Image: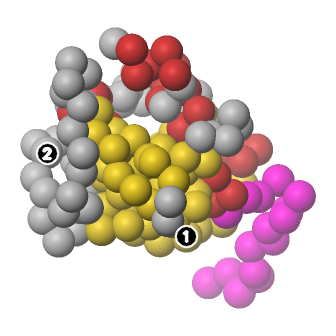
Amino acid sequence: MDNREKVIDYANTSEFMTFELGAMKYAIELPKIREILTYPEIITTLPNISEWVKGLINLRGEVVPILDIRIKFNTSESVYDENTSVIAVITEDSRMVGIVVDLVDDVQRLDTSTLAPVSEMGSAIPAKYLKGYVRLDNNEMLVVMDIEKVVAKEELQD
């Protein structure tokens, strides 16, 4: 039995919010997240938009598009229940966007220098939307999402 503590190099670590989409666990950098919401009862739907754009909500005076990435990436059946959550993220161009996930998990500190390329593992989500993955202590895989690419303005047009 090894009693030595595992040394964590905090220079390479960041905090991430983990969440579930179907059977996989994903993560987004914590600083990008403004807040976590339950799935809103009132969403203003918009005409002629792609199915994954659920509509708009008013979040403290800000108009926020709600995007169901489960539909976009076909990760799981889009069930809306008490676990369904919306992660409100702030993009680099200062837009606030809500993404719908199956379940928000917790905050985890990850060593970003250990990210492995996604092409090695295959994922329901195309590699261009992902930064990589890490294997957790319990051998579970945690995929780090590139949220900027997922909610880029060009993505909303398709």
Disc number for residue 107: 1
Say left or right for 111 vs 49. Answer: right
Q: Is residue 17 in the magenta section?
A: yes
Q: Which quadrant is the C terminus positioned in?
A: top left
Comes first in the chain, label 2 or label 1: 2
In the rendered image, residue 4, in percent from the top left (x then y), is placed at 76, 82
In the rendered image, residue 22, in percent from the top left (x then y), is placed at 22, 47
Give the extent of the magenta segment: 1-19
The image shows a total of numbered marks equal to: 2
Nearer the viewer's eye, disc 2 or disc 1? 2
Residue at 59% x, 40% y is 95
Q: Amino acid at mark 2?
A: Ser
Residue 158 in view (yes/no)? yes
In the rendered image, residue 15, in percent from the top left (x then y), is placed at 67, 63
Which residue is denoted by mark 2 in the rendering? 78
Say left or right for 141 vs 56. Answer: right
Kind of element beneath mark 2 = loop
Kind of element beneath mark 1 = strand
Residue at far right of view: 11
Q: Which quadrant would residue 116 be assigned to in this image?
A: top right
Q: Callout 1 environment at 10 Å: few (<14), some (14 to 19), or many (20+)? A: some
Residue 75 in view (yes/no)? no
Q: Callout 2 environment at 10 Å: few (<14), some (14 to 19), or many (20+)? A: some
Q: Which quadrant is the N terminus positioned in?
A: bottom right
Residue at 89% x, 58% y is 11
Depicted 133 relative to depicted 87: above or below: above
Q: Which quadrant would residue 69 be assigned to in this image?
A: top left
Residue at 17% x, 71% y is 82
Disc number for residue 140: none
In the rendered image, residue 62, in percent from the top left (x then y), is placed at 51, 53
Cβ–Cβ under 8 Å for marks 2 and 1 = no
